[in-house]
Image (cartoon, grey):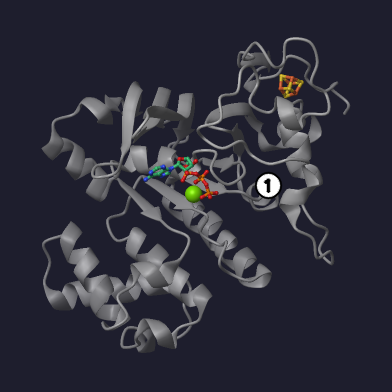
Amino acid sequence: MANRSERLLDMRGLTLAVATGEGLLTVVEDLSLTLDAGETLGIVGESGCGKSLTSLAIMGLLEGTPVRVLAGEILFQGRDLLRLPARERRAIMGNEMSMIFQEPMTSLNPVYRIGDQIVETIREHRKISKSAARQRALELLTMVRIPDPAGRLDSYPHQLSGGQRQRVMIAMALAGSPRLLIADEPTTALDVTVQAQILKLIVDLQAETGMGVMLISHDLGVIAETCDRIAVMYRGRVVESAASAELFSAMRHPYTRGLLDSIPEADEDVDRLTAIPGRVPMLDEALAGCAFHPRCTRAGKGCDEVVPGLDMIAPSHLVRCHYPLEQDA
Ligand SMILES: Nc1ncnc2c1ncn2[C@@H]1O[C@H](COP(=O)(O)OP(=O)(O)OP(=O)(O)O)[C@@H](O)[C@H]1O
Ligand code: SF4
Ligand SMILES: [Mg+2]
């Protein structure tokens, strides 16, 4: 079971930039996050704020992309992934941490049976016979609560529903018994009912295995129901972070407030991003001061000139704002 005090991840000052013809554009700036075993950390923010790049940096998957690590440390169980010899780093990436992505169809090979794909993944992690791996595949499919797991081993991806395919992807992510699971928008492509089932599955598996889970979503509603702690990102920076209960009872950042107000009611059909006026600035738009100022109703003196620091306003509650909301807002 989880040793809750075990610090799995300690990211310090991570700064990422994209190399373009005109030079380097910063996409993630001075990002610090921690995650303990047995804990679920939610990362939330609108499209383009740097959520996926942060997770790819943790997973060591930025190689071959135009994205560069400019600064920072990513300590995993005390060892800096960015400075480990490549072999040690690959061993950690392959076994100790795992990631699930938004669209399971793109990660499953349509021409191979589900069972064969899971067996292959298992055998990348463990040197075991094909029949032992098939037994383990069955265990994994059972673990992710797929109906008729034995029958499903022989199915092709197109024979499964979207929710079942995502369960298969989760089973494959668990093949190496990872300590850290990163789920990047794992339910965005699913309808609301299936979304809730998959989130519950992730929560249950987290409790069963004691993994640390990083759950990424643009939807604060998804994060709210699932996570112990939440970090809200805007344009590459954390703007507020706190325990979930604290964040919802005493949110202090205008952007967090905007995200909360944009969660649609169950029977409402609205584009949730329109609730915050304006749009996320483009990467190459030079913006002095707080990056949220063109959209912020509270913007005041200095907001368009000075980048606010990330201040601790209560134990474990950090806010980056010159004029934070009142406590009872
Ligand atoms: N390979 C790349 N080349 C150039 N720019 C990139 C690349 N990958 C990401 N970016 C840019 O970096 C910024 C952060 O991207 P990232 O994918 O991390 O956003 P995100 O928060 O995951 O968004 P979404 O919610 O849409 O998934 C975006 O502005 C994006 O356009
Ligand atoms: S620093 Fe200013 S512009 Fe930025 S969120 Fe706070 S009040 Fe709004
Ligand atoms: Mg993303």
Q: Residue at x 56, y 30 (%)?
A: 285
Residue 210, placed above or below residue 155: above
The foreground one among 288 and 249 is: 288
Quarter of the picture containing the C terminus is: top right
**Direction from residue 307 to residue 12 in the image, left or right:** left
The reply to whether residue 213 is in sight is no
Q: Residue 72 versus residue 10: which sits nearer the camera?
A: 72
Does residue 215 appear left or right of residue 300 in this picture? left
* Residue 21: percent from left, percent from top: 34, 34
**Could you say where residue 75 lies in the image, as x and y percent from the top left?**
33, 27
**Residue at the right extreme of this rendering:** 328
Look at mark 1 in the image and give the residue it sits on: 220
* Count of marks placed on residues: 1
91 relative to 107, above or below: above
Camera-nearest residue between 158 and 229: 158
**In the depicted structure, whether residue 146 falls above or below residue 276:** below
Mark 1, residues whose alpha carbon is within 10 Å: few (<14), some, or many (≥20)? Answer: many
Q: What residue is shown at x 49% (from left), y 38% (from top)? A: 50
- 251 or 39, nearer to the observer: 251
Q: Position of residue 6 (x, y in %)?
A: 41, 31
Name the residue rendered at 22%, 65% in the picture.
122
Quarter of the image where ligand 2 sits: top right
